[in-house]
Amino acid sequence: MEPQAGAILVEPPERTLGRRLRGRAADWGPALGVFVLGLALWEGLVQGLDVERFLLPPPSEILETLRENWGPLSGAAWFTFQEALGGFAIGSAAGIAVALVLARWRRVGRAIMPYAIAANAVPIIAFAPITNNWFGVTNKSSKMAIAAVLVFFPVLVNTLRGLTSVRPASIELMRSYAAGELDVFRRVRIPNALPFVFTGLKVATVLAMIGAIVGDYFGGSQDSLGIQIRRSAGIFAFTHAWAAIVLASALGIAFYAAVAVAERLTMRRYPSARRAD
């Protein structure tokens, strides 16, 4: 039957779902193909060229080691993830709070920004022993402090950029309605900054994992992933060390993906932020 003029055609849900799945496959297919090809080349070259296992073990042996030692490795990974998550939360909250202050009071920003840059320039290798001395070698707080320092600056810079890169016309419109500074932040600056904030948070997930693991290298609990990697490399159990590295990478990817999902859900509630992005 021919549709009547002016009728709205509604696409069946299964067709919409199929279209979304095809779109996702087109987006992720090339990356997945490169990943599989890289693993196959890695396995083939190591086996074919008879590379020594202490130099580079094949993926099959790494996965087998990961399966055999899943209990202690997963426990160490969870311990380190707690350190990274704590540092991520502290550093991100501090970065966003300072960015709000700097965006509101520009003179304060000119006074504080050099110190934020100096904190970001501190080598993490030099800072790790200091935090261990402050909070204790086996205390999670010392690793959280390292992760927080790494996280703070990218979140601060991205948030501040989002808060200050508002169109002047939008500010003038709010002023014409006699809106106060709080309303300007709530209705204009913060929605405009959301894409920038999530960009900083996604970068921060990786930095938080790096900070937690690097901190463990300078002393930490025997239950941490960094200690597992250092100890395995020290006794030439490189396959075990690689298994721990793979697990740490998987955690970092999952952490990043969780923030990306949170970004997508948040952007659905703020269409103006999507347009600003």
Image (tube, grey):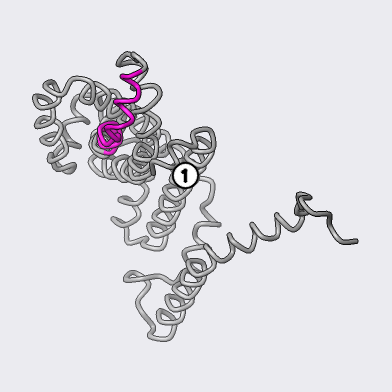
Q: Is residue 99 left or right of residue 253?
A: left
The span picked out in magenta is: 158-176
In the foreground, 165 or 4: 4
Residue 275 figure quarter: top left
Secondary structure of residue under mark 1: helix
Q: Is residue 200 above or below residue 13?
A: above
From this viewpoint, which residue is outermost toward the right? Answer: 1
In the foreground, 64 or 16: 16
- The percent coordinates of residue 101 (x first, y second) are 23, 21
The residue shown at (9%, 32%) is 114
Residue behind mark 1: 260
Disc 1 crowd, CA 10 A, few/some/many (<14, 14-19, 20+): some
- The percent coordinates of residue 123 (x first, y second) are 14, 43
Q: How many numbered marks appear? A: 1
The residue shown at (41%, 50%) is 248
Q: Is residue 66 above or below residue 269?
A: below
Does the magenta stretch mainly form a helix, a strand or a loop? helix
Residue 140 figure quarter: top left
Image quadrant occupied by the N terminus: bottom right
Q: Amino acid at mark 1?
A: Ala
